[in-house]
Image (tube, grey):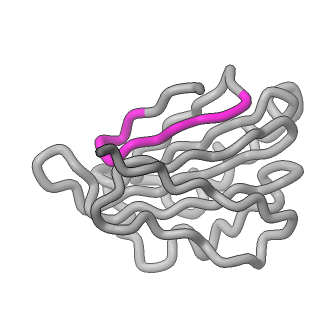
C-alpha cells in the first residue's frame, strides 16, 4: 500500500512552522496553487534519496514563505537541493526573480530548481518534481 504524500499547509505569512517530511514518506505535495509559491529544501543525499526534506507553502507568493526556517541548519553546499514551485498566477509576476535573488544571497551553493507550469506539484525524495 502506497503512503500518501505530505501535503503542505497554505500559510499566508512567513512566520508559520516549516513542515518536515516524515521518515517513510517519499513525496511532498504543494496543494492547489495560483498566486502561491511553495519551496522544498532537501539535503543529506544518501544513495539517491534525500534524508532531510522540509517545505513551506506561501499563500500569496514568495513573500509569505518562511525562508529562514527552511534553511536553518541546512548546509550551503551543491548537494543541497531547493525546488521552488511557482503557482500559475505567481509565474506571471516577479516571484521567480525573488526566489533567484533570495537563493543568490542566502544559500548560493545549493542547487536551485524552478518548477512552473502547474497549479499543484509533487516533489519526491529523489529531488524530482511533477505537476499534478
Q: Residue at x 80, y 45 (%)?
A: 36
Residue 36 magenta-drawn?
no
Determine the image quadrant of residue 124: top left
* Magenta part, dominant SS: loop
Determine the image quadrant of residue 18: bottom right
Determine the image quadrant of residue 42: bottom left
Q: Residue at x 67, y 34 (%)?
A: 120
User: Quick one: quadrant of the N terminus?
Assistant: top left
Kindly give the residue lying farthest to the left in the view shown.
Answer: 47
Residue 63's spot in the image, x, y percent?
Answer: 82, 58
Q: Which of 74 and 1 lies nearest the eye of the viewer?
A: 1
Kindly give the residue lying farthest to the front in the view shown.
Answer: 1
With 31 as the anchor, is 130 left or right in this view? left
Query: How many labels sit on residues?
Result: 0
Q: Residue at x 63, y 57 (%)?
A: 8
User: Quick one: quadrant of the C terminus?
Assistant: top right
Q: Residue at x 66, y 55 (%)?
A: 102
The region drawn magenta spans 119-128
Residue 22 in the image: above or below residue 3: below
With 112 as the anchor, is 32 left or right in this view? right
With 52 as the anchor, is 82 left or right in this view? right
Q: Which of 47 and 74 lies nearest the eye of the viewer?
A: 47
Residue 79's spot in the image, x, y percent?
Answer: 28, 52
Residue 130's spot in the image, x, y percent?
Answer: 50, 27
Residue 12's spot in the image, x, y percent?
Answer: 86, 63
Q: Which of 118 and 68 lies nearest the eye of the viewer?
A: 118
Amino acid at each position: 500500500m502506497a503512503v500518501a504524500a505530505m501535503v503542505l499547509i497554505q500559510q499566508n505569512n512567513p512566520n508559520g512552522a516549516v513542515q518536515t517530511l516524515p521518515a517513510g514518506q517519499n513525496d511532498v505535495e504543494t496543494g492547489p496553487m495560483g498566486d502561491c509559491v511553495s519551496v522544498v529544501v532537501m539535503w543529506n543525499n544518501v544513495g539517491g534519496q534525500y534524508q532531510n526534506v522540509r517545505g513551506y507553502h506561501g499563500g500569496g507568493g514568495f513573500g509569505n514563505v518562511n525562508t529562514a526556517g527552511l534553511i536553518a541548519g541546512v548546509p550551503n553546499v551543491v548537494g543541497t537541493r531547493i525546488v521552488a514551485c511557482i503557482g500559475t498566477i505567481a509565474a506571471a509576476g516577479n516571484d521567480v526573480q525573488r526566489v533567484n535573488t533570495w537563493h543568490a544571497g542566502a544559500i548560493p551553493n545549493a542547487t536551485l530548481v524552478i518548477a512552473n507550469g502547474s497549479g499543484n506539484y509533487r516533489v519526491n525524495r529523489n529531488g524530482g518534481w511533477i505537476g499534478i
